[in-house]
Image (cartoon, rainbow, N blue to C red):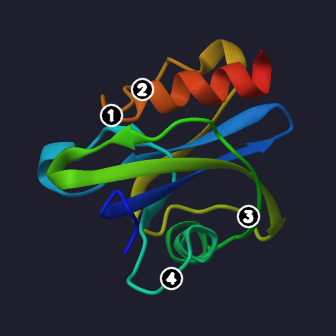
Amino acid sequence: MDAFGKLVVGAAIVQDGRLLAAQRAEPEALRGGWEFPGGKVDPGESDLDALVRECVEELGVEIVPGERVAGEWPLPNGYVMRVWLAGIRRGVPSAHEHLALRWLTHQELYDVAWLSADLPAVAAVEKLVWG
């Protein structure tokens, strides 16, 4: 396993100058909060393989991972999140496991209630994408 223990990967999917945000359905404590699509890395799975797999499962799209966003963010229960910029190779995102999806322009980036653990990653993505 990774030196950090339990790893979560997130995809900062950017298309036409907009960032895709996903609204959590579960667990109940996080329901309604917004996050990057992604999820846990399975034992023996690479970070990028997990990122691609999670986007297929959650959004029904095949992504092309790009640059990793500088930073690693602690999550509850000993998890650590890493985020990559990504583009869509194939498909149109749909909310398979989320309540809703929303494409956010730079001006709308904080119009959704990001999960508190995701906020520092959102700020890092903002700096990387929009300067």
Q: Is residue 80 left or right of residue 50?
A: left
Q: x, y percentage for residue 71?
A: 53, 36
Mark 2 to mark 3 CA distance (whole Å): 25 Å
Q: Residue at x 29, y 55 (%)?
A: 25
Q: Amino acid at mark 3?
A: Val
Residue corresponding to mark 1: 115
Residue corresponding to mark 3: 92
Q: x, y percentage for residue 101?
A: 53, 47
Q: Residues within 10 Å of mark 2 (few under 14, many from 20)?
A: some
Q: Amino acid at mark 1?
A: Leu
Which tag is nearer the camera, tag 2 or tag 3? 2
Mark 4 to mark 2 CA distance (whole Å): 26 Å
Q: Residue at x 50, y 46 (%)?
A: 36
Q: x, y percentage for residue 19?
A: 68, 37
Name the N-terminal-most of marks 4 and 3: 4
Which tag is nearer the camera, tag 4 or tag 1? 4
Residue corresponding to mark 4: 45
Name the N-terminal-most of marks 4 and 1: 4
Q: x, y percentage for residue 44?
A: 45, 87
Residue contact at pointers 2 and 3, CB within 8 angstroms: no
The circle on residue 119 is: 2
Tell which of 2 and 115 is nearer to you: 2
Tell which of 13 and 97 is nearer to you: 13
Secondary structure of the residue carrying numbered label 2? helix
Residue contact at pointers 1 and 2, CB within 8 angstroms: yes
Q: Is residue 108 left or right of residue 117?
A: right
Mark 1 to mark 3 CA distance (whole Å): 24 Å
